[in-house]
Amino acid sequence: MIAHVSGVVAEKFGSSVIVDVHDIGYEVQVAASDFDQSLLGEPVKFYTYHHIREQSQELFGFSSLAAKKLFELLITVQGVGPKAALSILSVGDSEQVRNAIANSDSGFVAKANGVGKKIAERVVVDLSDKVGLPVAVASASGTTVAPAGDEALEALMALGYTLQDAMTALEGVPKDASTAERVTLALRAQ
């Protein structure tokens, strides 16, 4: 399985980005936000899901581990294939989609191309308890908001932590430490 692709953006078309990795071009299908952020000639890294079918193989790419994990949850829902899951992730960033599912907002999910009302309702019913809490998590001192792009938080969520548990695990961990150190310290504290 191909876990990630790092290289330079060689071409963009449709919803795909071709990533040049040492003179080999990998076509990676990405969500709309990742497509817009990928600039020709610029370095990029996508965490990938390698989808193998009898007649083809496809790579689906995500700029964060949290988005990849959410994609993998989406494709477990009956009637949601990889392209529909990518379409759902294109409606907003991964946290917006996660929050919509956690809050049972099937209308938000139904905005995705090719996803009807029934599939959107099935997504929120099947996954609302699996995606964790919304980004705004109530605490004793008020409301805390998960920092966008926190790789340690994303790594813990990729390991199966809910958003709230990952934020709790990282509370006493220094923010200036490397991602690997922060994850290690958070895991040891549990």
Image (cartoon, rainbow, N blue to C red):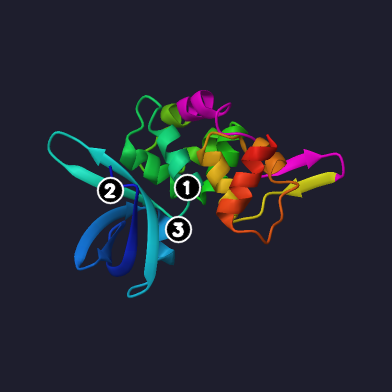
Residue under label 1, please give it. 65
Ranked by sequence position, the earlier of labels 3 and 2 is 3
Taking depth in this image into account, of 157 and 142 the one nearest to the observer is 157
**Residue 26 place in picture, x, y as percent:** 23, 58
Residue under label 2, please give it. 59
Up/down of 124 relative to 174, above or below: above
Q: Between marks 3 and 1, how big is the CA–CA gap?
A: 15 Å
Magenta stretch holds residue 126: yes
**Residue 183 place in picture, x, y as percent:** 60, 47
Q: Residues within 10 Å of mark 3 (few under 14, many from 20)?
A: some
- Amino acid on which the number 3 mark rests in the picture: Ser
In this image, 2 relative to 53: left or right?
Answer: right
- Outermost residue, bottom direction? 41
**Residue 38 place in picture, x, y as percent:** 39, 66
Taking depth in this image into account, of 147 and 188 the one nearest to the observer is 188
Quadrant in the rendering for residue 15: bottom left
Q: Quadrant of the N terminus?
A: top left
